[in-house]
Image: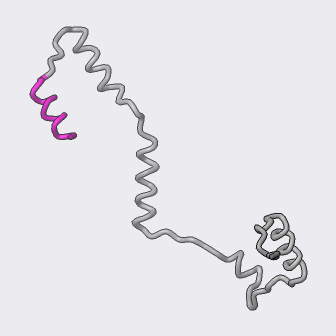
Amino acid sequence: MNIQGNNPIDGKDLYNKVQDLNKNQEPVKKDNVEKADIDQDKISLSGKAMEIRELKDLIEQLPDIRKDKVEQIKKAVDAGNYNIDSLKVAERILEEI
């Protein structure tokens, strides 16, 4: 008994057949679409979105480190009068959890 046509598909052969079929077809053209219509796409932001963008820009301009606060703490540590309230530290840690 001889069975034919049950061979696995060769991916390369299948690809070539699809390419041959696509060569014979004409590209599909959409009606009523002109280049001028595509060039006129616009975007507009609401007043709230513009306000958010402005605030975001202002935040990005802020320094990452508050130098005045760092200097104040450095001076207190150097003078020996920088005290840490361990209860407040513990409360803040628990708030973050």
Q: Residue lying at the far left in this picture: please name it.
A: 87
In the picture, which quadrant includes the N terminus?
bottom right
Residue 19 lies in the magenta stretch = no
Q: Residue lying at the far top in this picture: please name it.
A: 79
Quadrant of the rendered structure where residue 46 is? bottom left
**Image point (78%, 69%), residue name:** 7
Q: Is residue 24 left or right of residue 55?
A: right
Q: Position of residue 79 (x, y in %)?
A: 21, 8
User: Does 88 sit above or below residue 78?
Assistant: below
| Figure coloring | one colour
Q: Magenta stretch? A: 85-97
Q: Position of residue 41 (x, y in %)?
A: 64, 75
Q: Residue lying at the far front in this picture: please name it.
A: 1
Q: Residue lying at the far bottom in this picture: please name it.
A: 31
Q: Most prominent secondary structure in the magenta stretch?
A: helix
Instruction: Please give the count of numbered marks on the rendered protein.
Output: 0
**Image point (40%, 53%), residue name:** 55
Q: Position of residue 52 (x, y in %)?
A: 41, 58
**Image point (29%, 26%), residue name:** 69
In the picture, which quadrant includes the C terminus?
top left
Quadrant of the rendered structure where residue 36 is? bottom right
Q: Closest to the observer: 79 or 18?
A: 18
Q: Is residue 15 left or right of residue 43?
A: right
Residue 86 lies in the magenta stretch = yes
Q: Closest to the observer: 67 or 7?
A: 7
Q: Position of residue 45 (x, y in %)?
A: 49, 68
**Image point (89%, 76%), residue name:** 20
User: Does 52 sit above or below residue 57?
Assistant: below
Q: Closest to the observer: 88 or 97?
A: 97
